[in-house]
Amino acid sequence: MKKINANFRSEFPFFMALPAVAWQFFFCYVPVVCLILLSFLRSGNTAFDTQAVTLENYTYFFSPLFALVIGRSLLLAFCTAFFCLLFAYPVSYCLAIKIRRFKNIFLFFLILPFWTSFMVQAYAWFFVLEHNGLINTILLNLGVISAPLHLLNTTLSIYIVMVYCYLPFMIMPLYTALEKIDRRFFEAAADLGATQWQTFTKLTIPLSMPGIKTGFFLVFVPAFGEFVIPTLLGGGKKLFVGSLISQYFFVARNPNIGSAFTVITCIVLLMAVGLLYWFFNRKTVLTLTQED
Amino acid sequence: MKNIRLENIKKSFSGEVILENINLTIPGGKIFALLGPSGSGKTTILRLIAGFETADEGRIYLGDEDITDTPVNQRHVNTVFQNYALFPHLNVFENIAFSQRIKKVPEEIVQQKVNKVIKTVHLEKHINKSIGQLSGGQQQRVAIARAIINEPEVLLLDEPLAALDLKLRERMLLELIDLQSTLKTTFVYVTHDQFEALTVADTMAIMNPDGQIEQIGTPKEIYEFPASSFVAQFVGSSNIFNGTLRIKDDQQYLEIEGVGACQILAPKGKEWIYDGAQVFMSVRPEKIDISKELLPGFSNHVQGTVASIVYHGRSTQYNVRLSNNKIVQVFEQNEEHFPKEVIDYDDVVYLMWQKENVVILEK
């Protein structure tokens, strides 16, 4: 028995990990290094050449225009994550703590959209938001509005669909974190005199913090670079980081400048994530556990 | 200290009746143990007193106050949970201080109270540790400290020592008894372990698997004078014989098939005691003497063959087969390293006991 365990520990994991590590290395780290190298080459150069090394690709971006695009994307990512958290928390809470029967069925229907492509989900929203779409039809028939609302191709529509599409990424870690909380903790808190609200702020939120953090990052990071939804539902009127990068690569066909911009956005994203990480680990936990 | 009174309590879970017609008075300022097998509803009674469950029918009183509809967080009752339910995100200090933080007690008073209560449970050294760093016994102490800091009128303990090893359990039991005599709080102690209940309780109630209370009394009363064959067999072990009661003049006998006539002392003034009545006789294994020779001075004896021997250390258990194939358990203290008489398998032995030491039970 002991021998088998020893063998298992020394040899098995190494071989098991190899394909994944190789995959990561060749298809993530190598391309990223290529991308960084590309960003230091003068436009039009794709092969490495010492003559073509330059920093000029980066100089383009010291302008308010690009700061605006990055800021807009940061705002979109933050708000998406924030509203996802706001909407997902009550759902996950009920599902994990309040509901006892048919819980897996409810969860299944909540996660179902997640199994369909983003593109399909985004297009489906066209029918909801367009001039003679679902929302306008309902509101018109109810007499709430007299003329159809202009919903499609607005920033609002981007936000709505972003929050909708990213919701499962928030629900899943939250649900998992909340489900793990021992029911007896709630009883113990009540036993010690806590009201439901006090139990929520002093127990439920701190104990679900790992889920909140995971969910927030799971939404925030991809939402920052999202380009399908802003492009489709914003009508391309406002540029976001993702759409700008895709424009450089696929429309302007200038991978050098595109790479430089990508590198800059990655740095911004890392800084933003670092800031959020600091925030979650210091401020929120402290204020929520010490105060009501 | 206030009594707890349960009146006509009924409780069912999804149609299945767990408790019915429960009438129980728990004396104040003492340790009361609720002993029963799993599924007997003892934990449900505890949860009803705590307020985690609501009774379908009946009232619960704490002293003269009807607390049936008082929400959990307003009852002057605190609970030590089976697996402690300590909050993993708070350290020892904050766990203990939880109820004080809820009440928004000023910081210095919280400090004072926690420091006082932590001394009571001997955890001074561990005050800043996280819950995960503590051993089972230490977690148990935190759970107790957290529950008593509020100075509750009643402390409910739900199988509090179930997760501890035997030695630690014995020590914690004595500490709990000490704690209770210091605090003078009413303790309600739920357990399925008869050893714990007998050790800790001033008064105890025995519940049967149907959710009924079979007997209430002091540990000694329960052990020596069980009120039913269930109690006799659940608390300690007991040899139960079926027999027919014979009352001739002022002599009382029990006719037992395969054993013969046994002298007994039947309880007086019971309507089920009459000549010819079918009754149970309960004899505790340690109340029976075993020997290869018939010793004088016993009111009853029977012959049998040793079927098996179980060595327990402080005592030896002999399982003796009677002529009717019934197995009788006998405990003998191992008083000597080299006993004068060695009893072995298949030996023919006499079992002897006094009529004062048997209990006659209604069938």
Image (cartoon, coloured by chain):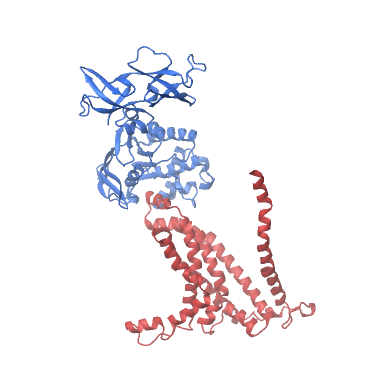
Indicate the position of residue B176 as horizontal and vertical percent values. 41, 35
Indicate the position of residue B209 as horizontal and vertical percent values. 34, 40
Query: From the viewer's perspective, is residue B170 above or below residue A145?
Result: above
Indicate the position of residue A101 as horizontal and vertical percent values. 39, 59
Chain B display color:
blue
Q: Residue at x 56, y 71 (%)?
A: A222
In the image shown, does B355 or A278 lie closer to the viewer? B355
Q: Residue furthest bottom?
A: A147
Left or right of A288: which side holds B214? left
**Could one spot residue A4 in this view of the protein?**
yes
**Could one spot residue B149 in this view of the protein?**
no
The quadrant in which the N terminus of chain B is found is top left
Among the 4 quarters of the image, the one containing residue A91: bottom left
In the image shown, does B172 or B346 lie closer to the viewer? B346
The quadrant in which the C terminus of chain B is found is top left
Query: From the viewer's perspective, is residue A170 above or below residue B237?
Result: below
Q: Residue at x 54, y 72 (%)?
A: A223
Q: Which chain is red?
A: A
